[in-house]
Amino acid sequence: MARTTADITVPDLTGKLAVVTGASDGMGLFLAGRLAAAGAEVIMPVRNRRKGETAIATIREWHPGAAVSLRDLDLASLRSVATLGAALRDEGRPIHLMINNAGVMTPPTHQYTAEGIELQFGTNHLAHVALVAHLMPLLRAGRARVTSQTSVAANSNEINWDDPTWQGPYNAGRAYSHSKIAFGLFGLELQRRSEAGNWGITSNITQPGIAPTNLLAARPEVGRTRDTMSVRLIRVLSRVGLLGTPQTAMLPALYAATHPDARPGRFYGPQSVANMSGRPGEQKLYSNLRSEEDAARMWDLSAKLAGVSFPA
């Protein structure tokens, strides 16, 4: 693997409670590890308990004494999201940092969530919208910073307004872009709604560039039995230093979630050519994410589809 040269300094997070989705492997694992190393207590909601336990053991090898714990969460089920939200509200602990990182990319067949919503839109976007809504009292109590992970794919294709849950003709790549545009719009609208309603939380969005994560690798749980050609090529380009690694790809989210200079309502990503790798920093907002009208429309649609409500 290519040497990891890009990095940032994380401030002391002692006494902070963080929630990181998708922390059982890849970028999420490194994110959870860095937050724990800085003193935060990290809750890791996972679908696969065995992978989660392995991830916790790995973090504690890296950082002995790290305060990390698992919770059950299947992002392909809004009922599971609601159950986690209720459990954390019962615990009653303010949340200070939330990184919405988990996702699924281009499954080999047209797949659906438990509610019959296209898997990528349901998992990458709607489930996280629902989780933010269910955790809103705790986020407000902690005056949380919410960081939501979008993708370079949000810079291509468009929102499928005519069929947002993809019940009709299907294109996996376009559906992936659709999910990531929607989630970027939500993260920006979350900041605007918080400001208007005095919710006390801040929200920003990030994209990790391109790195050899498990998104395009073999994933039996979505029916992909072998690595894609794309991820094989990405691994080669990563090894020779032309693309990032999971350790560098998580840096924009880490920066956006923790750095004193990271501002609400802004977009962060790697700073090399085409924003594909390198040190994190603020980048120009993709054209697909600039419309406040689209963001408000997606906010209302998403709340309806997810069956949640937000403060007035």
Image: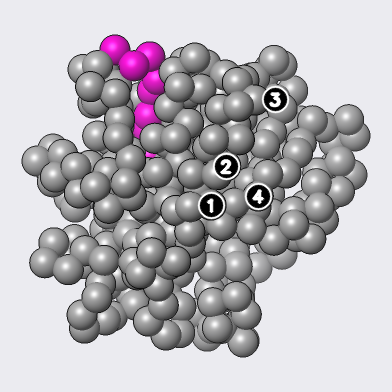
User: Earlier along the polypeptide chain: callout 2 or callout 4?
Assistant: 4
Q: CA distance from mark 3 to mark 1?
A: 25 Å
Q: CA distance from mark 4 to mark 3?
A: 20 Å
Amino acid of disc 3: Ala
Is disc 2 placed on a helix, strand or loop? helix
Is 200 included in the stretch rendered in magenta? Answer: yes
On the question of residue 76 being in view, the answer is yes
Q: CA distance from mark 1 to mark 4?
A: 8 Å
Compared across the picture, whether 5 is left or right of 270 comes to right
Q: Which residue is mark 1?
A: 80
Q: Tags 2 and 3 in contact by the CB under 8 Å rule?
A: no
Q: Tags 2 and 4 in contact by the CB under 8 Å rule?
A: yes
Q: Which residue is mark 3?
A: 40
User: Earlier along the polypeptide chain: callout 1 or callout 4?
Assistant: 4
Residue at 70% x, 25% y: name it. Answer: 40
Is disc 3 placed on a helix, strand or loop? loop
Is 236 included in the stretch rendered in magenta? Answer: no
Q: CA distance from mark 2 to mark 3?
A: 20 Å
Q: Is residue 34 above or below residue 4?
A: above
Q: Which residue is mark 2?
A: 84
Q: Tags 3 and 1 in contact by the CB under 8 Å rule?
A: no
Q: Tags 1 and 4 in contact by the CB under 8 Å rule?
A: yes
Neighbor class of circle 4 (other Cα within 10 Å; few <14, some 14-19, many 20+) is: some
| Magenta part of the chain | 198-209
State which quadrant residue 63 falls in: top right
Q: CA distance from mark 2 to mark 1?
A: 6 Å
Compared across the picture, whether 78 is left or right of 96 comes to left
Residue at 15% x, 39% y: name it. Answer: 296
Compared across the picture, whether 130 is left or right of 287 comes to right
Where is residue 17 shown, x and y percent of the image? Answer: 64, 24
Is disc 1 placed on a helix, strand or loop? helix
